[in-house]
Image (spheres, rainbow, N blue to C red):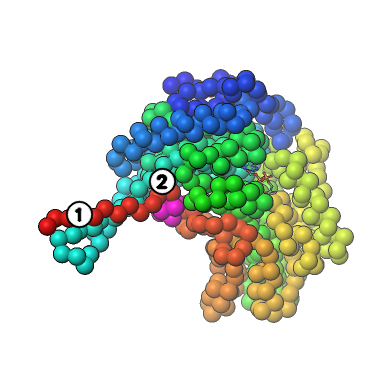
Amino acid sequence: MTETATTDHVHFIDGQWQPSQDGAFVPAVSPANRKELGRVAQGDRVDARTAVAAARRGHEALAKMSRWDLARACNRVADEIEKRRDILATTLAQEQGKPLMGEAYGEVDAAALGYREAGELFKWMAGEVIPVETPGKRAISYRAPRGVYGVITPWNFPVNIPVEYLAPCLAAGNAVVWVPAPSTSLCAARLMECIVEADLPAGAVNLVHGPGPVVGDEVVGHAGVDGIGFTGSPATGAAIAARGAGKPMLLELGGNGPVIVLDDADPVRAAEAAAAGSFFNAGQVCAATGRVLCARGVQEPFAEALLAAAQKVKIGDPMDPDTTMGPLNNPAVADKVEAHVADGLERGGVLLAGGHRMPDLGSDLFFAPTVIGDVPPGADLNAAETFGPVAPIVVLDSDDELIAAANAARHGLAASVFTRDLARAFRFGEAIQAGLVNINSPSSYWELHLPFGGAPGKDSGIGRLGGKHTLQAVTEIKTITFDIS
Ligand code: NDP
């Protein structure tokens, strides 16, 4: 199978690279200098429907493959990702904006590992022989693929987040129609080139570029799609949940991760973790440190250490090996970060560092690493997801106040607690309404096999990603009974 051309990237449907049925293209633009990086096919509902029909045939072919065959296919994709490590990482840095050396290569390596782990884990996921009451009967159960998955993925980790769905779907024998975020379409095309090299049955994985509200919406609502995987905002997650009502869904909808610094914590260690959580990928991480909830008494040494960490951030061209933070990915997220900072300052927050764009660096999507002290609890910086390089500090008086503030947010994805006291660590770990609580590590610490998702009753999504949990989500238990009398 052939690769896409250098500058024009098209859909991959039914085992073929192909343009949109109406021939439309849109430019792909670098966030660092606003230069055009290439052109991407702009799909519509017809392209989406063609892909779903192909995926139905693709699933029939995948269903005939053994788990060993599927695991070998996963390994072939991983091999190809490793071979194309440079082009994948370069595209990530150029189109998404993350630093090449510090972050992009790491994301590519995680994607290769994700394929290997998914294939291996599903191979060994055994079913059950279930005891039954009736003499002469026997019963077994095992996990079977659901059929065709619609996978809609965002722009913040445009290689690895897709793999969190695509790899388990392939390992378990589900075909996929994948609709990636338009602002990182080239990254999707590069990943698809690796999948193509694994020589899967036609229709097993289909990539359709285009606007989410058009192509994504068609896929989610299509009767030929049996399950949905989506990572993005709560608003879009709610729209998808309504459109695809009744279908099994994995929804990962973002967070507003508090780092909670107790009065017995090492403030320097906590500040370094908060800086890592707030500035990695310019804060565009669902498990980012969206806010710091700091016990009164420790806020001064903590803020001092956080400022020192912020000053070490080297913001600039993502392709420069010395850069540790690039631009924000798109104008909408930059506008939101700016609005949240303005709101926090208007309500009495104290600007300690940054707080502004840095257009001299090449585009107005560069936003300075920002630290804001004395943020009032009601400010957007505390109450909503900022998704930018901002560490807002809220100071509170007691453990109960810290827990209440952590739980007051609508999000509940990832949190972190810094303390030297094991009993307090347990108390906070159990009381905080988040799917993941990291004690003495950044809110963003996670490994591919750990269960990850939103707490019940929050706006952070439903279901669990990670290792066997995604495999369980994209499969259904099949039971077969036998009469041997
Ligand atoms: P969205 O949730 O709007 O977009 C995520 C993806 O969903 C995009 O590919 C988008 O396409 C697509 N989409 C949009 N509407 C629909 C629909 N009706 N049906 C199917 N797919 C759809 O997030 P944004 O990119 O607008 O970012 C907004 C905010 O969301 C961020 O600032 C951040 O707070 C949060 N976010 C959280 C992420 C996370 O990791 N949890 C990831 C990304 C964003 P299109 O771009 O064409 O609309």
How far is the residue under mark 2 from the one under mark 1?
A: 23 Å
**Amino acid at dot 1:** Phe
Evaluate whether residue 287 shows in this view.
Answer: no
Tag 1: Cα neighbours inside 10 Å, few (<14), some, or many (≥20)?
Answer: few
Q: Is residue 110 left or right of residue 171?
A: right
Magenta residue check for 472: yes
Q: Position of residue 153 (x, y in %)?
A: 58, 42
| Residue 293 position by quadrant | bottom right
Find ligand 1 in the image and state its quadrant.
top right
Mark 2 and mark 1 residues within 8 Å of each other at the beta carbon: no
For label 1, the residue is 482
> What residue lies at 54% left-to-right and 79% top-to-bottom?
423
Bounds of the magenta span? 468-473
| Residue 295 position by quadrant | bottom right
Q: Is residue 23 above or below residue 56?
A: above
**Amino acid at dot 2:** Arg
Q: Is residue 426 left or right of residue 305?
A: left
Q: Is residue 225 above or below residue 411?
A: above
For label 2, the residue is 146
> What residue lies at 67% left-to-right and 51% top-to-bottom?
235
Q: Position of residue 169 (x, y in %)?
A: 43, 43
Magenta residue check for 376: no
**In the image, is the residue at mark 1 within 8 Å of ligand 1 by its beta carbon?**
no
The residue nearer to you, when weighing 176 against 308, is 176
